[in-house]
Amino acid sequence: QVQLVESGGGSVQAGGSLRLSCATSGGSFSVYCMGWFRQAPGKEREGVASIVTTGPTTYADSVKGRFTVSRDNAKNTLYLQMDSLKPQDTAMYYCAVLYCSTWRVRYWGQGTQVTVSP
């Protein structure tokens, strides 16, 4: 069974930065397509960023130029660097193993909260 554990969330003022990590175990991380999702109160969960096994990435329009997704296959870890944070980025952030070339999720993490104050 694949397990994903997010960390790095917290509270920050607008304009600040946070780096989320997602440690994985129980699977073959290097062959997985991975993604980050977020869900704000009262809103549907949305895809934020994805990265395929060889490194190409995709981003939601709302975070392009501010967020960077990366992976360290030697550490079985996925990252999300979030810069120039805005209050509207406030949400629970989840990492996930994806079906490649889709936003369909194979496995979810438990989430980490990000709160951005004005």
Image (tube, rainbow, N blue to C red):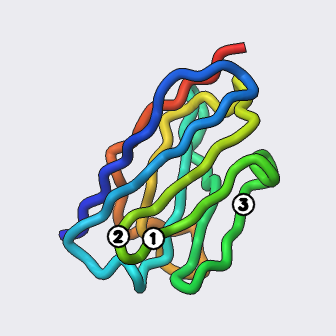
In primary-sequence order, the first of circles 3 and 2 is: 3
How far is the residue under mark 2 from the one under mark 1? 6 Å
Do the residues bearing badges 2 and 1 touch, measured as CB atoms within 8 Å? yes
Residue nearest the viewer, comparing 68 with 2: 68
> Residue 76: percent from the left, percent from the top?
35, 70
Residue nearest the viewer, comparing 67 with 91: 67
Kind of element beneath mark 3: strand
The residue identified by callout 1 is 72
Res 105 label: none
Mark 2 neighbour density, 10 Å: few (under 14) some (14–19) many (20 or more) = some
Seen at 75% across and 35% down, the residue is: 84
Seen at 57% across and 27% down, the residue is: 42
Kind of element beneath mark 1: strand
* Residue type for callout 2: Asn
Res 59 label: 3
How far is the residue under mark 1 from the one under mark 3? 19 Å
- Of the residues tagged 1 and 3, which is closer to the observer? 1
Kind of element beneath mark 2: loop
Residue nearest the viewer, comparing 50 with 19: 19
Res 76 label: 2
